[in-house]
Image (cartoon, grey):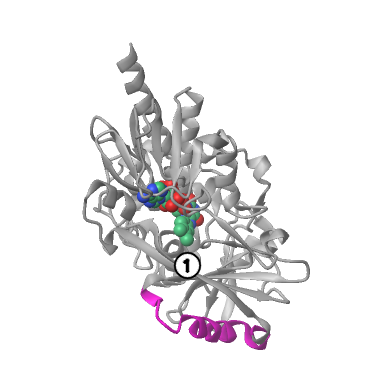
Amino acid sequence: MSSSDRVVVVGGGVSGLACAHRLHKAGVPFTLLEAADAPGGRVRTDHYNGFLLDRGFQVLLTAYPEAGRLLNYKKLSLRKFRSGALIRWGGGFHRLVDPWRDPFKALPTLFSPIGTFRDKLKIAKLRSNVKSKSLFNIFNAEDQTTIAELKSYQFSPEIINQFFRPFFGGVFLDRDLLTSSRMFNFVFQMFSRGHVTLPREGIGQIANQLASRLPRDRIRLGCRVQKIQENVVHLEDGSEISSRGIVIAAGGEATARLLGRPFDSHQRRQVACLYFRAPKSPLNEPYLVLNGESHGPVNNLCVPSLVSPDYAPQGQHLISTSVLQDCMDDNLESKVVAQMQEWYGSQVEEWEHLRTYHIAEALPNQASGVPPSFTQGKINSHVYLCGDFCMQGSLNAAMYSGRLAAEELSEDLSATIS
Ligand SMILES: Cc1cc2nc3c(=O)[nH]c(=O)nc-3n(C[C@H](O)[C@H](O)[C@H](O)COP(=O)(O)OP(=O)(O)OC[C@H]3O[C@@H](n4cnc5c(N)ncnc54)[C@H](O)[C@@H]3O)c2cc1C
């Protein structure tokens, strides 16, 4: 057994990296063990024939407070989506624009067939209610489902189905909108306060930036932890590390396995992301496209190469389509192509399928009344937990959770020494 005066962090997703970063800043020696061949967990980008394929479509909201503190946005070279969305409905596409961001484009959207005129005024009311709230108030407000929250504003069924359902259904991977209204209000505030972005060279740059701040010899890749007994970490290769403290930052199912607890599919949300290459973009501007109709597997679509040209080789475009769990089946690719032909016509014949990512554990189930799967922080005298399954499903929460675990552990260690 290698005896160690180090803390062991299990998992190199953004929560484990944020935790390690905080330990490093506090001068606490650590070793981060990551099972995969690179850090990042759910935040990775693959290079494929000149394309950048994020492992599932996700975005960084610049208003995230913890991410804003931790990341160097300038170095990530963030590229913005246009605010608002294009909504597929009634056989056409309709723009819904945020009037505070894009006043010139907003006026026609007030009269677009998406929802009623009153709905658009209510969106403004919701925005002003939510925008000024403190995060404390948001997360301590009475909890109900997102759909109940929207109904309390008396939004029409049309705007709920055409806009809120695909938009927030895509964010929470939950088209039923059973997600907690606290999470809805938090995310709505983040959308209202900042920009929706992608790092120029892919979402994985977020994890790469965090990893680059840690001493290289403190990160061990391809190291799967098999079990944890008291202060000893047992690796799959048979070796053992004794530690001064262990932080498990391993995601939902893996954390449950290491703790010997049950974990089932109701605790997580899954998504599939299908990528296509195309000689021509189906959009002119970097909007998110939402499926406001009740048929077709694709919930949302975007063209990452319009947001950042680095996502595709010159003269080509990358198209990203997301399918939520209720619409997944064996013939997904052909159903997605059929839907795209209905939306964009014959140009889709020139699209070529690049890759499909099925992400079984994309987000925790954040339904109203469902507590996080795990307790944040210290759970016994050796083990601390962090990650989005201890808090909420977002990059921001994963980073915050990692930092909190590191701070709690550092304090405990200094209390032991003194
Ligand atoms: C498709 C998709 C879309 C998303 N969209 C957004 C979005 O738009 N905005 C947003 O803010 N968030 C989004 N998220 C959520 C966000 O990515 C996650 O909340 C966050 O990345 C979780 O980080 P984590 O460190 O908690 O977990 P993970 O990223 O799951 O990290 C866990 C790590 O532990 C490692 N590990 C597991 N078991 C072991 C073991 N036994 N030994 C060693 N290592 C182990 C894994 O390999 C992994 O690297 C999205 C996620 C996905 C997948």
**Is 257 in front, or is 405?**
257
Residue found 42% across the figure and 43% down from its top: 397
x, y percentage for residue 312? Answer: 70, 65
Residue 154 lies, with reference to residue 230, above or below; the image says below
Quarter of the rendering occupied by the C terminus: top left
Q: Is residue 221 left or right of residue 139?
A: right
Horizontal and vertical percent position of residue 145: 30, 57
Q: Is residue 68 above or below residue 409?
A: below
Residue 117 point in image, percent of width and height: 50, 66
Q: What type of secondary structure mainly makes up the magenta span?
A: helix
Taking the spot 25% from the left edge, 61% from the top edge, the residue there is 264
> In the rendered image, which residue does mark 1 sit on?
163
- Secondary structure found at label 1: helix
> Seen from this angle, which residue lies furthest right?
315
Magenta stretch: includes residue 335: yes
Q: Give the magenta range.
A: 326-348
Residue at 71%, 59% (x, y): give it. 310
Pick out the residue farthest to the top: 418
